């Protein structure tokens, strides 16, 4: 049956970005001893996204970051917003970029070209290799992209970029 293979329609709602990140980090990273957590996201930013989908994306990326640091380390989740008009003629730069940085050992070189393909997993126990592939598809359906921005012995940085139409600032928010 082809209907089962189709992704469910996106249920776009207003989601507080900081609240969503706090929830994901509390579930995955906060219980881990030896992790230095840093979240730098303005609580005034609201995303117009499928909440369950974006929760799944953030969960996959944060879980991978935590797994990359079995002996502990630093996990940072930050967001930068480039509103329409500030990104210049490159409209891809307008919107929100959520970055997840870890101080793990980096992504193994042998899986870099397969990273976002189904069933590609490094040496992660209990990993199906579907998390990043599914995450990329969810973000693409929102008109954005997810990418490995940097990796090496000092850690990795994953970035989720969503277009400007998916982000707004609530009145009275902190700057």
Image (tube, grey):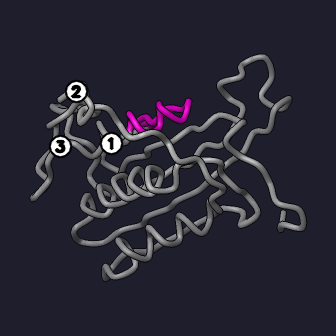
Q: Residue 42 at what x, y percent from top left?
A: 72, 63
Residue at 54%, 65% (x, y): give it: 20
Q: On the image, numbered disc 3 is attached to which residue? A: 129
**Res 5 → quadrant:** top left
Tag 1–tag 2 contact (CB < 8 Å)? no
Q: On the image, numbered disc 1 is attached to which residue? A: 152
Q: State which region is magenta.
A: 136-149
Residue 45 located left or right of residue 156: right
Q: Residue 25 at what x, y percent from top left?
A: 44, 70
Residue at 71%, 36% (x, y): give it: 164
Q: Residue 16 at what x, y percent from top left?
A: 65, 62
Look at the numbered disc 3 and give the secondary structure of its residue: loop
Instruction: Give the quarter of the figure containing the C terminus.
Output: bottom right
Q: Residue furthest top?
A: 89
The total number of labels drawn is 3
Q: Where residue 2 is drawn, which disc sits there?
A: 2
| Nearer the observer, 160 or 165 | 165
Q: Residue 77 at what x, y percent from top left?
A: 52, 59
Instruction: Give the quarter of the figure containing the N terminus.
Output: top left
In reply to whether residue 8 is colored magenta, the answer given is no
At label 1, counting other C-alpha atoms closer than 10 Å, the crowd grade (few under 14, some 14-19, many 20 or more) is some
Q: Where residue 106 is drawn, which disc sits there?
A: none
Look at the numbered disc 1 and give the secondary structure of its residue: strand
- Distance from label 1 to label 2 (Cα)? 41 Å
Q: Which is nearer the N-term, disc 2 or disc 3?
A: 2
| Nearer the observer, 12 or 133 | 12
């Amino acid at each position: 049956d082809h209907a089962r293979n189709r992704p469910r329609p996106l249920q776009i709602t207003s989601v507080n970005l900081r609240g969503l990140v706090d929830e994901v980090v509390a579930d995955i990273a906060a219980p881990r001893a030896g992790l230095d957590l840093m979240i730098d996201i303005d609580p005034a930013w609201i995303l117009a996204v499928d909440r369950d989908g974006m929760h799944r994306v953030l969960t996959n990326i944060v879980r991978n970051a935590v797994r990359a640091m079995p002996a502990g380390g630093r996990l940072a989740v930050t967001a930068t917003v480039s509103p329409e008009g500030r990104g210049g003629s490159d409209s891809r730069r307008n919107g929100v970029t959520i970055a997840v940085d870890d101080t793990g050992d980096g992504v193994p070189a042998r899986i870099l070209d397969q990273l976002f393909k189904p069933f590609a997993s490094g040496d992660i126990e209990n990993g199906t290799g579907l998390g990043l592939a599914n995450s990329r598809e969810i973000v693409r359906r929102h008109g954005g992209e997810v990418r490995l921005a940097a990796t090496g012995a000092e850690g990795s940085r994953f970035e989720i970029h969503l277009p400007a139409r998916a982000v707004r600032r609530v009145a009275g928010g902190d700057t």
